[in-house]
Every structure is written in structure tokens, then in C-alpha cells.
Amino acid sequence: MILFSNWLHWFMVLTFTSLVNVVPFSGDTLNSNNSDREFVVVNSHAAVTLSNSTTNFNLGNAIAQASDVVRIHDIQGASHSSKLVGDTVTDVPGVITLVLGSGSGRGFYMQDPNPDDDDATSEGIFVFLGNSQIPNPSVGQSVAVTGRVSEFRPGNNANNLTTTQINANVAGGAVETIDSLGTITPTVIGTGGRIPPNTAINDDFTASDRGNVETEGDFEPASEGIDFYESLESMLVQINNPLAVSPTNGFGEIWLLPDNGANATRRTARGGSRISPKDFNPERIQIDDAPAISGRSPEVSVGATLGTITGIVDYNFNSYEILPFSITVNSPSSLTREVTNLAPEGNNLTVATFNVENLDPKLEEIDKVNEQQKSNVDDDLGNGKFAALADRIVNNLRSPDIICLEEIQDNTGAEINDGVVDANRTYEELMSAIVSIGGPAYDYRQINPVERQDGGQPGGNIRVGFLFNPNRVQFVDRAGGSSTTNTTVNNVSGQPELSVSPGRIAPTNPAFNDSRKSLVGEFIFQGQKLFAIANHWNSKGGDQPLYGPNQPPVLTTETQRRQQAQVINDFVDSILAVDSKANIVVLGDLNDFEFSEPLNILRGRPSGQGKTVLRNLVETLPANERYTYNFQGNAQVLDHILVSQNLFKRLKGYDVVHINSEFADRDSDHDPSVAQFNLSS
């Protein structure tokens, strides 16, 4: 009796009722089980000896009859969405590689140990069990799955890609144990395996002709990062010699490069991966500490090397990721925090920008913060953040003459709807901490926001402000500034003068809706006037992700930053209209890249056209030193210091002081920057 399995189409299982001899033809492969009664026959034919007679069977027809049985690579296909969505598939074979044993997401990953010859088609898939009565199987078990093909979009978020699944939690869904199909060998990502693209995430579309990768465009895993990781979706993979290019974040995620970064492009001087206009480093891959392992990822900084990573390729929260079975550290990062060489001395004025990340002096009461979430409670005084920031300002930045601070919160921090907007305690605690370690006795200037009108963490009422050393610089106080008062420039005997100082720039302009208002102040140093404009522009939160359906991503938030840039550019022009040689510095967290259109507009060169009004000092650095922030393993510039042409002529040095963005143990998520100018007459 010959029985052909109904779930394999490229190899056949033959079962006989008595002992037989099966002789392979040349090139065929046979594996016997069950006391020589069952044979797995690979290819198209075999000679079967039965009851002392020899019969030649051509299995081609049998294979053809079974070819309508679906395999994992048939389901996945060479695309982002399966062409079998909605179809019921029967007895799909695979070996279980990871089980998610509880909760609404219960299920398992499985993989076919006998792949096709097309790297573009993934051999892995997730089987959803949910609340079905199907028991959890075990890793390593061979199974045949019956269920409905679906595309699952995590969180039902339109900016997430879908993952292809078999839903066994349907009528007729089943998971049956079968004889062993063998074991799964991890696919190496990197040298000796499949090397990820290192330039394009997707190059099928342009900003003027966007497309959706789930429904259109070419599928090119060899050259496009978004297609590369899709072709490995749900598969068991291995990364050798992984190198961290991000610190461990608050979710236990680490972004890394395979092979110590051997195939990576655009590295930073300190070992990270930096972005450029056309390269957002698809060679990066994220590892996540859940759900494949218990506990939390180790705390690592940029440059740490990890042990070999083995795990499953998944997608969630706008990114492809690996669910590792374990994470070990081979060697910690050797990076140390930088100390600038630019010190305030004599005629050399130093100006810095520093985002201090939601700084406040209050240990919030949890029932008073937004949604009573623990993440909205901190203790910056008790945990030493004020002391640490003071140390960075004094010892790493060398006590700049003027510091633009971003994300100063009010006195009650993230407690909401309490009517508090004043931040005098926040400033005073920081200034006191600076003095306590031998730093200067700074003074400060700022203007309170209108409650709940400037964005940021709910309740925090973040704002920008100036610290300045009164022994080195004089602040010109001119009364009348308020939360809603617009500052203008007056011509006083041929010299520009602010209508109020400090003052807010166009605070009621829609460009600054739900965003921090820019603050301008007038300073005197060695008899020379300096206009400083502090900024914290609209966040990039809300832009479409790098690994989302729409390519290239729509940068929704950029529209507002373009508007903010134009407002500040116009204000700078109003100063220069009175004195073309005015000393102006525009600085802060602009939340965009040096090559972005908002920065072009600010400089006076929208779309690359026009006369440069402001010079961006980050462009004076070597390209591999240009970064102030790390987002998903991409080192990038968000914090800037730009100066007028006259002040640029007096530039003695500019430095991004890398003390935060590369480190898991940090006081803020931004690196500060400092510039030095010689303002001698």
C-alpha cells in the first residue's frame, strides 16, 4: 500500500504495509523510518521492491497531484503582503522555533527546514492561536498547521507594516504533530550569510511620487532594507559579532550592526552610525528583550560588543526587530564623556545649547500626573540629576558664558492642571548645584508659558531660557515681555534694539501652536551687543516611520518647523536690516537635521536658493562628528548653533560635546554644543 502525504509537494512520504526495499535512482534521496516501512523520497521517482518483485514508480504525477498543498514560502511570497490572504491553508508543515505561551497574542513561530531557492520568500511564519483550545506546542516540534492566512497590522496602526500569519483560531483550525522534519539552521545576517543593504531603505519612490510598499513597487531584498527584512520575516536568524550603535533604551531595545560594523557605511568618529540625506542606515537592526527572553536587556552604550545573537525576525512599533533567545555582553563600550577645549576667557565668549530633558524639582504624586502613569513621575532632585547636570555644565562644558536651556519644566513638573507655570525653583536648584561644585553664580532669564500651550510632557509646561554668567556678560533687561507679547526690533540711532528683553518672538503665530515659543535676549559682552535667540521647535513625533508602508515617509511635522524657521529668519532679517553687522546667535533644539528644509529656510536658503543669512556651525565639523542625538541607532543632529555672518568671522571654535546620546547612563537624551567667539574690538 502506498500512501502519499497531503501536505508535502516537493517531497513525498511513502508508507508500506510490509518490509520493502526502496532503491533511489541517481540524484534522488531516501530517508527511512518506522522499521523500513516509511520512506521520504526526494525528487521524482524511485524503484520499489515489494513481494519479491521490483516495480518502478514515477512519482511525477503524484507530486503534481499534491502540488496544490501550500508551503510557508508560498504563503509569504516575494512581497510585503501575502497573495493568499483570506484563504484557508491545510497541513502547512514547519518546525517550531519560538512559542508565545500566554495572552491574547498566544501563538508560535515556525519555519520550513527545506527552503525554496528564492531568498526573497521568507521560510518563517507566525501561527496565531489566541484563545483557541489548541494547546501550546514545544520548540523543536514538527507540526502541520491548518488555518486562515492573514496580514496582522500591530496595534491597528496605519503606520505599521503588516506581518503575515496563519490564524489557527478559526473554525477548522488545527495544529497536528508530525514526524520530525529536522532542525532549523539560523540564517546568518552579515558576512557568510545574507548581507543587509547599507544605503537604501526603499528606493522605489520619491517625495514627489510616494508609494505604498504593501501594494506597489518592486520587491528587492538585495538592495532595499525594507524588503530585506521582510524576506526574513518570522525566520530564525543569527548575528555574529554584533556591535551596539545605540545605548539600551527605556524599552530594553538595542540597535546594532553585524560583524562589528564591517559592511556598514557612514560611521561616526566614536563608532556609531550617522545619517545622511539619502542614507538612514538599513544595515542597523534592533534587538528586543521581549518576549523571547525573561528579564531585561543589559545596559550598554554605543561601541559595546555583544555575544552572538540568535532569534526570530519580527516587526512591531514601526521597526523590524529580532526577538533574541539571549543577550550577553562580550565587552562594554570604551567610550568616555568628552570635555570641550573651548573655555570662556578674556575676550573669548562661549555660548552653549543644552536640552536638559524635562528638568523639574518635584517628585510628582502619581495621582496628579497624566493618566496616573509611572513614566510621568520622576525625582530629579532625589536621583541626582540636578547634580549631574551641574557637573556636565562645569566640568564638561567648562561653564559657558551663556547657555540656552531647553525642556525646563515648571516647579511641579508633570503634575497636570494645577495652575503652576513658574519655574523659578527649577532654575534655582540647577544654579545652586553649579555653585556647589565651584561653578559660576549664574543668573537666568525666561518667560513663563501659558499653561498647556507649549506642548511637551503634559503638566510640565516646558520652555526655553537663558543661564548667563553675570561676571562675564550683561543681560539687557527691557520690561514688558510676557507670554503673549510679541517682540519687535527698533532702530535706535542706527542700532537695533529689542522692544522687550527677554521677549518671545511671535508667540501667537500659529507656527508656534502647541509648541515652545522662541525667546530672544539682548546681551552685552566687552562692550559689544549680542542677540541670542533660544529655540525648541516642534517635535518630529508624528512623522511616518522609516519602516512603514508609505515610502518615503511623510514628514507631517516638518510643515510646522518650516513655518517656525521662517518666523525666526524674518526676525533675524529685521535685526540685520538695522545693522548688517549685528552679532546674532540662533540656537537650541530645532528638532531637524542640518540638511533639512527647515534649516535651509532658517539659514536664508529655502530649497537651496538665496543668500545665506546664518551659518550653521555644525557644518564646520568633520562629517563623522556631526551628531547630537541618537534615534534608533541613527546618530543625527537635532541641536544647532547658527550665527550671523559677522559673528561667524569671529568664530574660534565649535564643539558638540558627546556626553549623553551614546550612553545608557545619561542625564539627558541630547548632547550639548558650545561655540567660542573672539569679540575683541
Image: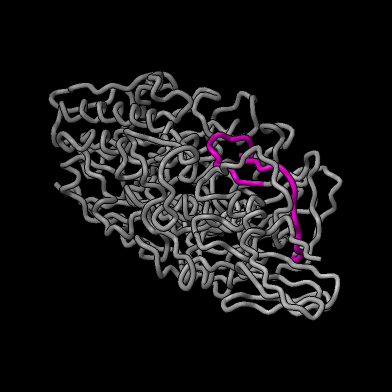
Left or right of residue 396: residue 208: left
Q: Which quadrant is the N terminus positioned in?
A: bottom right
Range covered by the magenta-colored residues: 140-165
Q: Depth check: give the residue in front, 530 or 137.
A: 137
- On the image, the x and y values in percent for residue 371 come to 69, 32
Colour convention: one colour
Residue at position x 26%, y 27% in the image? 571
- On the image, the x and y values in percent for residue 523 come to 29, 37
Residue at position x 60%, y 46% in the image? 163
Left or right of residue 602: residue 229: right
Name the image quarter holding residue 65. Answer: bottom right
Name the image quarter holding residue 309. Answer: bottom right
In the rendered image, residue 572 lying in the magenta stretch gets the answer no
- On the image, the x and y values in percent for residue 548 come to 49, 41
Q: Depth check: give the residue in front, 643 or 400.
A: 643
Task: Inspect this view and state whether residue 672 appears.
Answer: no
- On the image, the x and y values in percent for residue 180 come to 75, 68
Residue at position x 35%, y 29% in the image? 564
Please determine whether, in this image, residue 332 is positioned above or below residue 378: below
